[in-house]
Amino acid sequence: MERTKGRKVVKDKEVGDGDLCWWLVHKGISASFLCIAVFALLVRVAISLHPYSGAGNPPKYGDFEAQRHWMEITLNLPVKEWYRNSTTNDISYWGLDYPPLTAYQSYFHGLFLRFFHPESVSLFTSRGHESYLGKLLMRWTVLSSDALVFFPAVFYFVLAYHSGRSNGPKTHIAWHIAMILLSPCLMLIDHGHFQYNCISLGLTVGAVAAVLSNKELVACFLFSLALNHKQMTAYFAPAFFSHLLGKSLRRRNPVLEVLKLGLVVLGTFALVWWPYLHSMEAFSRVLSRLAPFERGIYEDYVANFWCTTSVLVKWKRIFTIQSLKLLSLGATVSTCLPSMVQQIWAPSNQGFLYGLLNSAFSFYMFSFQVHEKSILLPLLPASLLALEEPFLLKWITLCALFSMFPLLYRDKLILPYIAVSTLFVLTYYVPSGRQDRKEMHSFNSFFTTCFVSCSVVLHIVYLTMHPPHRYPFLFDAMIMLLCFSQFTLLAFYTNAKQWMLMKRSVLLDKEKKLH
Amino acid sequence: MSDLLWFFAISTCLKLLLIPSYHSTDFEVHRNWLALTHSLPLSQWYFDETSPWTLDYPPLFAYFERFLSIFAYLIDPQIVDLQKGLNYTSNSVIFFQRITVILSDSCLLYGVYRLTKDLDSRKRILIWVLVFWSPMLVIVDHLHFQYNGFLLGILLISLSFLEQGKDLAGGFFFAVLLCFKHLFAVAAPVYFVYLFRHYCWCGLVKGFRRLSVLGAVVVAVFAVAYGPFVYHGQIQQVLRRMFPFGRGLCHAYWAPNFWVFYIILDKGLAFFLRKLGFAIQTPEASFTGGLVGDSSPFAILPQITPLATFAMVLLALAPCLIKAWRNPQPGMITRWVTYAYTCGFLFGWHVHEKASLHFVIPLAFVAVQGLENARHYFWLSIVSCYSLFPLLFEAQEYPIKVLLLLLHSIIMWLAFSAQFTKGEEAKAAVRIKKKDEQLKLKGNSSRADKKEGFVIGGVEKSYLVGLLVVEIWSQFLHPLIFGDKLPFVPLMLISIYCGLGIMYSWIWQLRWIIRSPNL
């Protein structure tokens, strides 16, 4: 409470002389957005100069090859064959395991690649294709998706988010934009490691913006698209569901409202899945591709509950996959239930953003088959909440970066890792622009110093020393433990915060009544 | 100070990210210099011909390379191996050389710090944005590969001393700069006239004493640099290496300067006279072929000798020198020096397109002084940055250079319009009054400009649109229509178009210098 009060005082102050970015905000939000967006795009292009995952590493290569292979498959085979194992489509070699919207996107990007460099997407012969032009064209497909989906969505969000707020210094808005667009983890995974998270996350941001501006139908449409691009987006589904349900219940005709939303969702799904709806068999084949339960409950050293506790409890040995599925489902649902209940009970824009964060956290912690990269999902709402929770954003970003360090080390992306993390810290601490951020609780600062020094030591150890032969993944496990502890604390904090919001609004209401 | 570091650190992050990008043969040139200064005794530095990229910078730069080679040897001995290191492109050498450039930029940091520490905070921030985030420096130093940030830093340090009235130190640093890269010598006449009049012109005895002190300082710097080579009796060889006049009037890609128009005029005249029935011989050497021999490349117009270009530069400099002689004031020195480099760029012998950095970067300090200056800078820096585009011809860097220029233009537009709006008028006027005597002149001019906001004039606007057209033509339409035929046309078009822009800027600067009042 004290912190927020302190910030309001600063907010009322005009943009001072010492403010470094006073020139940035002079022409309004659009102009500063344009400027920051061009810078963010430049950083992304610069990151894309670096190696991608699995570069020069046969026979399986990495995510880059997977995406390229999908382009090859979608381009050369009819739609019905895309998810089916056949002589022309070897499912065991990077078979398509994302929903149909990703397949369509691969098809269009494949057209682009074929126009300039046909060899890179020809059937069979292009497996493991690596060339200067091939890499460049692939990189450009991600860059263009980012610029065409994620950036406009963020712009829409910023307009929606700030239209309903009291006028603070404009530099805060610019800072907020920079925090969302220059999110280091997203940039490293999409443009370094190689993935298309910008599309699904961009669609989600668009949906969030639509919710904030009370366009529920648009939100449903966009979020369904996001779900159909990457099933991982389901991490946000509880929050969307509970918030929209809560809102509808408050309308005059709740059943009709819910029905309308449901129809939009169903319609969008039907549209995307159209080629596979002709038979139950085709439909279930695609569905089974999307849920790869046989890959186990966790992979590598991801800082979530199952993986971390597996140090003590050998989950994979004790339980069958079937029971693990139920266990993880139960754990996930029960942990995101409090935040859902809060949103159904008292839906609010602020609470919705916290709800997104909480449900993404509980999925990251407890759901089945989580990657290190899944931390991008809790990161997104955290960056949207940057103005409310600057410390939270800094903390989760640093932890997330750290948790992805082993992955990026394997991808030979250490240099961009260092550069982009530094860039994040620099943009976070714009000098003299945001004095309010500097004052910190003594407990917090002790805590921060501890973590930062631990992580710096671990970075150096990881880079310079060999782990003992008996425990080849000792350092990975240590990183995982450290990050898990932080994520747990943060998840508790955000859940508590979401419930506290309600208390505050009740208090405010009471105050109003008293006056 | 921390604010200054913030801007610098942001650009450093970007530079780090750009490490794996394309680098030109200059990269191998500098690697070879590391190798030859490390493995050969000093007496053979300017004789070595193991690689075609012989040492052709002045001795201080060679010493600098010798210094860097100590660390290079520690990191990877193959970098400094004269034979085995040839065309060495492992990660170690790329990281080492790129990081030396990034670190040597701290010299630029210090130069900018010195020049801006007495300005008011808003102008200071503008300058930092313009210099540290300059797309031209990123393109030339961190993509193409050179050490311009470092050298320009020395120039800025020198200018900062002159602006503070510490002429001796200013002269010292300029002499040091000349011993690092002799191409900066174009401003020497301005320095000479200015120092002579401002520092030494104070009574016969005192003046003479000062003159001899200044002379001693300069001679000492040159002695340190060239002394060892004089001792070995190699000074002629050193000079021959430093001034390779055999390379011809123009570089393979024509720098957008006056001589482009001279060549075009010659070609045009020859074409028309041939049509009219005159027997005009086609010159043996051609400009589009790249290499130029001894024979005259011109069909009709007289050949240009290095001496003629030298005379042209001096002639163009004359108005500025006269001004400097009549009224040597520290507030004008940056403007005069940039003007000198503009003249050198326009009329010099074998000018590289990269040389436009020499005037664009110092002009940033002039740009914040008034609306007119800002307008001119906005326009000039876009044109000269665009003229650097042909340096990066690979597809991978295409989005980088375009985004760099775009970002720079947006930042300039935002920053200048924020600085020069009506609301700021009163505030700015108050601030200007507070300033000391030195800056009085700038205050006068900027107060006059502040009647309107930052608007680009019609001519300038249409020129910039033309730039876009030229880019679209040379990148997309030309290959589409002509295929591989006439490959030099797009480059020629860029040279001519940017040449027009730089000529305009030269005239603008000249007019400003002539019009500036004598106090």
Image: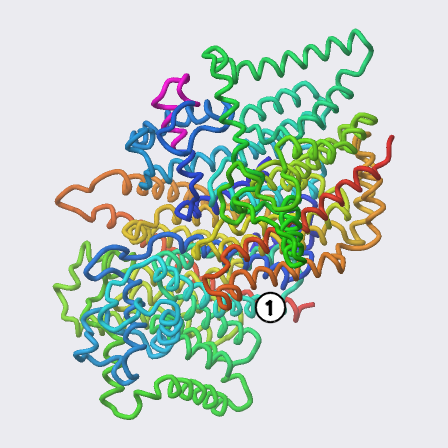
Q: Amino acid at mark 1?
A: Leu
Write the residue at 22% across / 89% down.
Answer: A281
Q: Main secondary structure of the magenta part?
A: helix
- For the residue pair B392 and A334, the one nearer the viewer reads as B392
Q: Where does residue A408 sit, x and y in percent of width and height?
A: 32, 52
Q: Where does residue A119 sit, x and y in percent of width and height?
A: 30, 68
Write the residue at 52% across / 58% down.
Answer: A386
Q: Residues within 10 Å of mark 1 (few under 14, many from 20)?
A: some
Query: Magenta segment: does it hold B490?
Result: no
Q: Where does residue A259 sit, x and y in percent of width and height?
A: 45, 90
- Name the side, left or right, on which B263 lies relative to B294: right
Query: Could you tell me if residue A502 is visible in this image?
Result: no
Q: Quadrant of the C terminus of chain A?
A: bottom right
Element type where label 1 sits in the image: helix
What is the tally of numbered marks visible in this picture?
A: 1
- Name the side, left or right, on which A145 lies relative to A100: right
Write the residue at 44% across / 47% down.
Answer: B18
- Name the side, left or right, on which A485 lies relative to A514: left
- For the residue pair A92 and B248, the one nearer the viewer reads as B248
* Span shown in magenta: B32-46
Question: Residue at label 1?
Answer: A159
- For the residue pair B469 and A198, the one nearer the viewer reads as B469
Residue A250, compared with residue B348, is above or below; it is: below
Query: Magenta segment: does it hold B39?
Result: yes
Name which quarter of the figure residue B132 lies in: top right
Q: Quadrant of the N terminus of chain A?
A: bottom right
Q: Chain of mark 1?
A: A
Give the residue at the far top of this rendering: B205
Image color mode: rainbow
Q: Where does residue A320 sit, x and y in percent of width and height?
A: 14, 70
Residue A468, compared with residue B110, is above or below; it is: below
Query: Could you tell me if residue A338 is visible in this image?
Result: yes
